[in-house]
Image (spheres, rainbow, N blue to C red):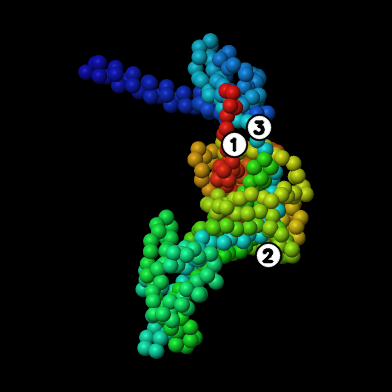
Amino acid sequence: MRFEHIRKITGGILLVSLLLLGFYKPFQQYIQIPDQITIFEGQELTFNKADHLAVATAATNEHIDVNESQYAISLEGMQAGEDKLLLEMAGFPVKKVDVNILKDFKVYPGGQSIGVKLNTLGVLVVGHHLVATKDEKLSPGEDAGIKVGDIITSIEGKKINSMADVGPFVEEAGKNGQALQLSVQRGKEKFNTMLKPIFDDKAKVYKIGIYIRDSAAGIGTMTFFEPNSKKYGALGHVISDMDTKKPIVVEDGQIVNSTVTAIEKGKNGTPGEKLARFSENQEVIGNITLNSPFGIFGKLNKPIKNGILDKPMPIALSSQVKEGPAKILTVVDGNNVEEYDVEIVSTVPQKFPATKGMVIKVTDPTLLNKTGGIVQGMSGSPIIQDGKVIGAVTHVFVNDPTSGYGVHIEWMLQEAGIDIYEKDKAS
């Protein structure tokens, strides 16, 4: 019994000691030091260090330059590759930090208002309707198992590119009393079905009982342009069909310059909107090859300028973004890109791609007066912090138009097919 009593007392003392250790400032500083650090060539990272903690001589100094003060450790990326930092306390090694230095990488920030034209992969089914025959009303499309959101990619084995391609097939099959073989894509699933056109007694034409669409258009904001690959990213979120609410599967598309003509101011419960028109000459400035949850992506035909920050800028990884002041670049009048103040309210250092990485709040009085905060069409506006491109505006909070979500630039670049993690080949 006595031994059991001593064991309980010892356990209690250890438990209290551990709890007290959690409040010990040097210990708190110690556990906040990351196990792994990633920085770019030429970039510097500083973090607080615990009392009595020092840098040992484990770093090779080939890839990083280490500066140490009483309260902080500063690292500068010198050359792409991998290095290690060994920290010691009272002469004993206590922590190893892996340091990954990425090649110097820069992008041109956007902010320009762009017009977006998307061509779907085939024709998109956006609804059903009844065809009135002499005796009854039917929907051949619905009877064939075709659903809203399906994409008709071919008819009778021939590729369908537009709505105009469908009419001749329907007319010929109707006159011959034949059924058409349709190839349909539903999400990742592909299947064939038979559909027989019927004669609309009122309209005097053959119909198939479905509404279709082959393209979509809208406006948004350019986020970045990478000059070596000529790749760009814009919008920061997926484009969905307004009727089906499903992401549009893109066959191809184009972007053109657009001009903001007016602003519908946002208010609680009702998001605002940029009103814009495509440029008069509708010159195509780039293509669209991907419509994803992180935005639209493709290549530009030529470099474009925003007239305010026309220089390559470094980027920040999601782990490097911090809460505090930042700026966005966007257009609210004509074609003029302007800089506005925002606040990074919260940020998540994500290890895997995700669309909602930041919460931002518009603090600029001029922008609040013009727009009420974040409005539709502002999606894609680049976010700048400490001279780095950190992400893009994506969604507005419906009940608070001054605030919304941002996506980290790291994931937009990855989606664009730009490898920023490439290590020095020689290392």
- The amino acid at mark 3 is Asp
Q: Position of residue 208 (x, y in %)?
A: 44, 76
Q: Please state which amino acid type lies under the numbered disc 1.
A: Ile
- Asked if residue 314 lies left or right of residue 141, the reply is right
> Between marks 2 and 1, how big is the CA–CA gap?
35 Å
Mark 2 touching mark 1, by CB under 8 A? no
Disc 2 vs disc 1: which is toward the camera?
1
Marks 3 and 1: CB-CB under 8 Å? no
Measured along the vertical axis of the image, is residue 376 above or below residue 84?
A: below
Q: Is residue 160 above or below residue 98?
A: below
The type of residue carrying mark 2 is: Leu
- To which residue does mark 1 refer? 420
Q: Which residue is mark 3?
A: 104
What residue is drawn where x is 59% and y is 16%?
Answer: 60
* Corner quadrant of residue 14: top left
Q: Which residue is mark 2?
A: 275
The answer to whether one can see residue 78 in this image is: yes
- Disc 3, SS: loop
Residue at image point 52% right, 39% down: 350
